[in-house]
Image: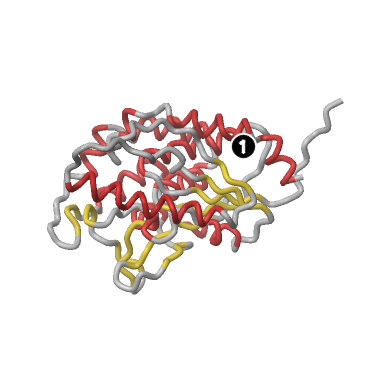
């Protein structure tokens, strides 16, 4: 007779950055909740903040996946990039907030049923800024505000940009949210090596940034109790950080697959 799983420990997820790869977080959450595992807190960086914050708001992973597939599309991306602002960033970024509101609804972080933190970085001081109160969509926008592309978001006395610049996977933050076990989700497993070929300056900047995040993410995961690394297919060259949200929807299944593969170990940690 199979012993019934009883979760006795609180679980916190540290959902990492990774652009379009962040869709894998949907699969991770889906596999956990569909197998009776309760998520007690989520800390997210960049796309991890987008998925984690939306789940904490909706409280239903099937609804989140449906909302994501329907509302993150070519039209919404064109809308998000339709407010050019040649100061601090190429785009103002305010329309991105509306996209996130459409995805998750209007909510205050402090009213969410699952505790949530979004990680951002102060552009002027280099300080890590954890956002745990206020408007959810604005917090997600702050955590995903890619430097050079979007204008920094004003949060209290800070001008904040993408949290991945400092903390690609917020394990420490998740740990501080009153949980017993922290599972990190690292989306950078397959981004290197890349093909030796001529690159544009933009591609070179992107890959240089990913080198930094690749190593920072591996360092952050050392403090997690368990790390999931979805097996996301890369083209070994250049991955568009934006259109992948539309044409790489299969990434969701990679998050689900790696979680199911490690389900027994995860349940043992939580029991």
Q: Residue furthest right?
A: 1
| Relative depth, front residue between 81 and 14 | 14
Query: Horizontal and vertical percent for residue 122?
Result: 34, 67
Neighbourhood count class around disc 1 (C-alpha, 10 Å): few under 14, some 14–19, many 20 upward: some
| Relative depth, front residue between 200 and 157 | 200
Q: Quadrant of the C terminus?
A: top right
> Taking 15 as reference, is 261 above or below it?
above
- Write the residue at 45% across / 47% down: 48
Query: Horizontal and vertical percent for residue 15?
Result: 50, 48
The residue under label 1 is 32
- Write the residue at 37% across / 33% down: 234
Image side of residue 66 versus residue 204, left or right = right
Query: Horizontal and vertical percent for residue 254?
Result: 49, 31
Image side of residue 164 versus residue 253, left or right = left
Q: Quadrant of the N terminus?
A: top right
Q: Residue furthest front?
A: 196
- Write the residue at 62% across / 47% down: 226
């Amino acid at each position: 007779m199979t012993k019934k799983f009883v979760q006795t420990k609180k679980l916190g997820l540290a959902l990492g950055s990774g652009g379009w790869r962040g869709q894998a977080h949907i699969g991770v959450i889906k596999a956990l909740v569909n197998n009776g595992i309760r998520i007690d807190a989520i800390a997210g960086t960049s796309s991890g903040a987008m998925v984690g914050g939306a789940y904490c708001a909706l409280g239903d992973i099937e609804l989140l996946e449906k909302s994501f597939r329907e509302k993150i599309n070519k039209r919404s991306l064109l809308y998000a990039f339709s407010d050019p602002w040649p100061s601090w960033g190429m785009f103002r970024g305010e329309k991105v907030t509306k996209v996130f509101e459409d995805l998750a609804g209007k909510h205050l972080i402090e009213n969410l049923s699952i505790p949530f933190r979004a990680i951002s970085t102060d552009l002027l001081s280099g300080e890590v800024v954890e956002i745990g109160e206020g408007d959810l969509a604005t917090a997600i926008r702050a955590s995903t505000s890619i430097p050079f592309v979007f204008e920094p978001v004003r949060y209290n006395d800070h001008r904040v940009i993408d949290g991945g610049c400092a903390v690609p996977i917020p394990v420490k933050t998740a740990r501080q949210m009153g949980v017993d076990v922290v599972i990190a989700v690292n989306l950078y497993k397959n981004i290197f090596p890349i093909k030796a070929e001529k690159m544009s300056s933009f591609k070179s900047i992107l890959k240089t940034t990913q080198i930094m995040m690749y190593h920072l993410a591996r360092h952050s995961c050392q403090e997690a109790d368990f790390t999931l690394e979805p097996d996301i297919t890369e083209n070994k060259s250049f991955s568009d950080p934006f259109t992948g949200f539309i044409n790489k929807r299969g990434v969701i299944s990679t998050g689900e697959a790696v979680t199911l593969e490690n389900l027994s170990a995860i349940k043992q940690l939580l029991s």
